[in-house]
Amino acid sequence: MKKPFLLFAACAAPFFLHAQEADTLTLLMNQMADIEVVAERVQQTSSNHVKLENQQLNKDNTGQNLPYLLMLTPALQVTSDDGLGVGYSYFRLRGTDHSRITMTMNDVPMNDQESQTVFWVNMTDLATSLSSVDVQRGVGTSTNGSAFGGAINMRTDNNRLDTTNHFTIGFNGGMYNTFREMGTAHLVSPRLGKGRFAMNARFSKVNSDGFLYRATSDLYSYFSDLGYYTDKTKVVLSFFGGNEKTGMAWDGVDYNTAYGVNGADRRYNPAGEYTVMASDGSDSTVYYDNQTDNYAQQHLQLHVGHSFSHHWSLNATLFYTHGKGYYEQYKNKKFSYFGLDNYTDENGEKVKKAYALYRKHLNSHFYGAVLSTKYVSEPADVQIGATASNYSNLHTGTLPYINDLHYGGLLPVNYEYYRNNGGKTDANVYAKANWRVINRQRERLSIYADLQYRFIDYRIHGVNDEDMSPINLKKQYHFFNPKAGLTYENRGHLAYASFAIANREPSRANFTENIHMEEDGTFSGNMPLPERLYDYEVGYTYSHPRFAVGANLYFMDYDNQLVLTGDYNDVGAMSTKNVKDSYRMGIELTAGVKITDWFRWDGNFVLSRNKILNYEQIVDIYDENYEWVRQDTWFFKETTIAFSPMITAMSLFTFDYKGLTATIQTNVTSKQYLDNTMHESAALKAFTTTNLNVQYTLPLRSWSQAKYLPEVRLLCQVNNIFNAKYANNGGADASYMEDGTHPWPWYFAQAGINVHGGFVVNF
C-alpha cells in the first residue's frame, strides 16, 4: 500500500502546487456549510455529548489509539492489551462495552458487522486525519445502525476545505521503543470552472515494544482523499486503511504480577510460553517468537453532496471495506479443539492433547450506500435518510504444525480444521426533525423527534470454530427505534429532556459461544436474544464567558441486556450473556472556569449505579487442592454489573502563554468487579492516573519576520507521572473455591511512568 500512496501524492503535487491565487473560497465554504452541518442541526441540543476538534484531539497524540485521546469524555474508560495504548485498545462508555457503541466515519458504519467493534490498530494514528469527533452518551441520533450505549461520529478533513497548500511532518519517540513518524499534505488546485480540486494525504508509522514483553506493535496507516468543490456541489473520493502486526498480550496475569506485589515483574506476558527439556534434563521456559495478530484493512468511500437551495440539500455515499488477516498461536491444545479424536499410543496410554501451531483467518467484504436529504428553515429542520449494506466474512482455521507423532504424520500441511461463512444484510430508514417552537434572539424552545426502522438478516453456515459442531443459523430482526426530546435555551441557560428506545442484535460470538447445533438444525444452549434499552435523559447547563457548569441525569432501563460475564474467548474478546432485567443510572457533572486569560480548569464527575435484578450464576466449585468438586447456582436479588465503576472523574488544568502550552490531566476510576458476583477476590482496584503534556511553538516568524518559515512545535508527554501500579481490565471465569474466593482471576497490567518527546513542523 505504501508505494501506490506515495506515487499518487507525487504525481498530483505539481498540479496542486500551482494553486497560489489570492482569491478565497469564503463564499463557497459558506454555501457548502448547508451540505456539511445540517446533520448536526437536525438533532437535539444537549450536554450528554462531547465534541473534540482536530487541534484539541491531537494535542496529546504521541501514537496512542483514538480511545486514549477521548479521555476528557465523562464516563469513558479505556483499556489496552499492551499496557501503553498503542496495540489493541478498547473503551467502555457508562459501563457499556465498545461492541455496543455505534461508530461512524463520515456517516459510514465502522463497526465490524460480526464482532460489532472497531479495531483501532487497523487505523493507527487515525486522529491526525480527523477534523472532529463527537462522542454521544446514551442513545444517539439516527444515521446508521442503533446507537445502543453511545455513538462516536467521526469526520475527516475532506469536510474542511481551505485555500492554502500546507504540509506537516511529525516525529516522536519514547520509552519501550515507541516511535511515531507522520506526514500530511493538503493541496488545492487553481479554480477550474465553477470550482476547484483539493487533496488531503497522510502516512503514519507507529512502532512499539509495548509495556508487556513481546506485546510489540508494528503498524502503519494511510489516508487520502480527492475532492471537487463548487458553491453547491462536492464530490469526494476517500481511501484509507492500514496494516498491523501485534504481539499477543490478551492472556492476562495474576493479581500479584499485575500490581507488582513483592517485586513481581509487571511486564510479564504468558502468551506463547511453553517448556522444553534442557540438556541436563531440567525444564526450561521458552516463548514462541511469532505469537502475533496480523491484519490489514482498506476503506473506500465516495461522497456526493449537492445543495439545491439554502433550504434543500442531498447527500449520497457509496462505501466498501475489505479486511483480511490471521492470528497465530502455539499452545498445548486438546485434539477436540481441532475436531480430532483422542487415540491410544503404543504404550496403551490415552493421548488427548499436544502442542500445536494454529492460525485463524478472516477475509471480509463490506459494502453499501448511505443516502439523506435535508430541509433547513427558521422554524424547523428535517432530515430523511436510509442506509443499506451487505457483509460477508470467511472464517477458516489451519494447522501448520502439531507436535504429535500420530497426527504429525497423518495430517496434510496447513490442515484446515474449520470453515464457516458469516453474512449480514443491514438496512434502515429514518426521519428526524427539530421544530423551534420559540425562536427569539436569546430564547429558544425546540421539540425534537427521531424515528428509525431497521432490518437485519444474519447468517452463519459451516463449522463452528468454538466446538467444531455444524452451524447453520439464519436470524432476522425488525427494530423500531424512536426518540423524542425537548430543549429550552435562554441567556446561557440550557435545559433539556429526552426519551429513546433502542434495540440491538447479538453479535456473532453471542451465537457461536452459547449454542451447540446438530446436523438437523436442533440446538442446545441459550440462544442469545436481542437487547432493548429505554433511555431517559434530563440535563441542564449554564455557560458564561468565564465559567460553565452542567449536570446530566440518566436512567437506562434494559430488557435482555447482554452484559459482560468476565470470561474471554480464544481471541481475547470478552464474553457476554443476556440478563432479563438490569439498569444503569447516574449523574454526570461537568464544570470549567477560565481563571485568567492564560490559565483554566475543566473537569467532570460521574456517579452511577449499575445493577442486574434477579441474577443467577452457575459456578464451578474447587477444593483447596484446586480439584473440581461440584457446580452451585448462586442467586442475587440485585448485583453490580461487571466492569461498571461507581465513580469516574477527570480534572484538566491548561496553561497557555506566549506559545507555551501545558496541561495536567488526571483521571480517576473507582473499583470495578470482574464478574457479576460482586466478590472482592475478582475486582479491579480503584486507580488514578495523571498525565503531563508540555508544548512550545518556536516563534521563528517573529524572530526573522519571514512568513515563509515553518511553524515548529516541540512536545513532551509524561504519562502516569506518579507511577501508579494499576490494571484497567481483567477477567474471571465462573470458578470459585469452597471458601468463596476466586482461584484465578486475571488482570492486564498498565505501564508506570513513561515519557515521550518529539516535534511537529507545519509548512
Image: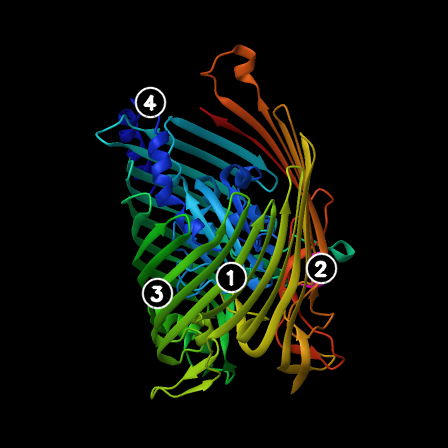
Mark 3 vs 1: CB contact within 8 A: no
Task: Name the one closer to the observer, 22 or 93.
Answer: 22
Q: Residue reaching furthest left? A: 193
Residue mark closest to the camera, 3 vs 1 = 1
- Taking the spot 31% from the left edge, 23% from the top edge, the residue there is 17
Amino acid identity at mark 1: Gly
The residue that disc 3 covers is: 428
User: x and y percent of residue 87 in the render?
Assistant: 52, 50
Task: Name the one closer to the observer, 10 or 751.
Answer: 10
The residue that disc 2 covers is: 670
Residue 407 lies left or right of residue 75; in this view the side is: left
**Among the two numbered marks 3 and 2 on one chain, the one whose residue lies closer to the N terminus:** 3
User: x and y percent of residue 198 in the render?
Assistant: 32, 33
**Among the two numbered marks 4 and 1 on one chain, the one whose residue lies closer to the N terminus:** 4
User: x and y percent of residue 668 in the render?
Assistant: 70, 53
The residue that disc 4 covers is: 23
Task: Name the one closer to the observer, 264 or 693.
Answer: 693
- For the record, the magenta segment spans 253-259
